[in-house]
Image (cartoon, coloured by chain):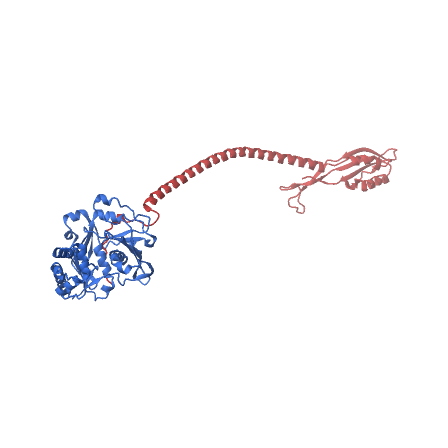
Chain colours: A blue, B red
Amino acid sequence: MTTQAKQEKPRANKTLTDVVGVEVGANLPLGTPVVRIRRASDGSVELTAAGFLSLLSALPESVEDAADGDGTWILPKVYGASSAAIAITSESAILRQASSLQDALSENEKKECRAGTYTLAGGDLGLVAGIPEYIGAWAATLLPESRKPTACSLQVSQLAWINAFLVSEDFASTNGTALLLLVDRRSTAIIVFNARQMILYREYSVGSDDVIDALGRDMNLDQATIETILEDDLVDPTSAIEPVLAPLFRQAELSTDYAHRKNQCFVERFFVAHDFPGTRYWAQVFKSKTGGTLVPCNPLNGFRVAEGAKIPADFDHVSQYFVSAMGAAVAVLEDA
Amino acid sequence: MSQTIHINLLKKTERRSPLPVRFRVMVPLLSCLLVLIVLFAAGLLRLKRKSLEVAIADIILKQDDLKNSHREFTELKKRERVTLMEAEQFESYLGGRLVYAPVLLDLPRVVPPTMQLASLQITAPVRVLLPASPKKGALAGAKGDKMSDREAVGLRLAGLVNSASSIDALKAEFLSETFTNLIVGVEVPQGSFKASGGASAYYLFELNAAFTERVFK
């Protein structure tokens, strides 16, 4: 196990004003999402390029697979910043809140993972992020030496997404206190912010696929049909969804209570990451269980785009796929 | 602005440079190149030193030759100086030589027929001693006195003459243009013109002619 402490800022980042962000492991049919973010002269960050590139970004499944990927990526010139931040989307990735690295990781994880910590503001608990060592070693060598860009940061994609949320217009519109549900296929993270800083991170094993599975069991339908049902109004699947989501939302309620007790903050803004099938039913159930309004959030909505930026024509429709890449790049720029 | 959370899982050893020049490659290469340059420079210096040593040895050899040549040259120069001095002396002798031949050749012409010469003598050259401090009444020959570089000879004639006018005629001839540059003064010593005695009508006489002074350097 290796650790990188927050205090160990890379020297190279001192003058960084232009960073490429890449998400690997997302396995999107459109390609590998890549963005280029730069700090404008007024100090704000802006998007200068975004696109799906045909790069082999599927994560290796073993140490042997990882050995094949040394320096194979050549990015187009439009992504020719000197540094790149890579967000890794992996089921094996770790993001936990814990008092120490030792407490956060199991013995097996300690042996096989590289991990880093971050001390959350005003709390006893820190944040621990980690990825399997072979994935880290593989990702570090994707971009070849002597060509722009080269990797300057490896991040867990959940945390990259949170960073994107932290700089989003949605979060800026709050008073600094909010709850974010980061929904994955098989898990959902509940994240509470106070005074514009993260104070709580909890992960529960209920995800978007669990909802689909529950509907499939209940209605005896295939996944494609269920996704269609979730997008239109022909059938109300709330009764099937509610038992799955109720425990999760109960946990969200408990988290807001905890935040209120610990930090005397009252959470009244709720966001759900990703606009996945059935989001509105998630919002309905959330409303019925907690009384709060769950709003789908895309941090790239309203994000400043530079004049003449090279972005896809349908960027508004596909922008949610660039969030992790953008979040990783922004974290590097903000840390510089 | 919210503070983002950056947990960088990239190891320091995994960081790569985007610069086209790979320091990992260039540093050893440059080091090797530097060592080669230093070695080359050292070799060059060594070679230069060697050639300088050869040149110095050559110069020392040449210096010995030159010393011999210089010694010979100095010797020759000394000899030349001596020779020149001798030549100069000879020239000086030539310059100082009194040419008596014209006087002697002209004597039969200028001596009146009434005069019979009993003796003709060229007096020894006399050099004057010059006093170092010419005080009134000081005697010559004191310490520090120098010999004058001028000397002169004289012509002394003695014989019989019929009258004093013949002597005067000879004196006039000696002081004429013919002997201008040779004879500067003619005198008949006091008491030298006297009767020869007996029944002869001739008189004994003496006549001294002072020759021009010559300078010897």
Q: Where is residue B193 in the image (x, y as percent from the top left)?
A: 82, 38
Q: Position of residue A59 (x, y in %)?
A: 23, 49
Q: In which quarter of the image is residue B156?
A: top right
On the rendered structure, is A291 left or right of B200? left
Most foreground residue, A326 or B97: A326
On the rendered structure, is A219 left or right of B192? left
On the rendered structure, is A105 left or right of B166? left
Q: Is residue A121 visible?
A: no
Q: What residue is drawn where x is 60% and y is 35%?
A: B77
Quadrant for the C terminus of chain A, please: bottom left
* Count of numbered labels shown in the rendering: 0
Q: Quadrant of residue A177?
A: bottom left
- Would you place residue B65 above or below residue B143 in this image? above
On the rendered structure, is A306 left or right of A61? right
Q: Can residue A29 be seen in this view?
A: yes
- Would you place residue A2 above or below residue A298 in this image? above
Q: Position of residue A131 (x, y in %)?
A: 20, 50
Q: Where is residue B189 in the image (x, y as percent from the top left)?
A: 79, 40
**Residue at the farthest front position:** A234
Most foreground residue, A91 or B110: A91
Q: Quadrant of residue B149?
A: top right
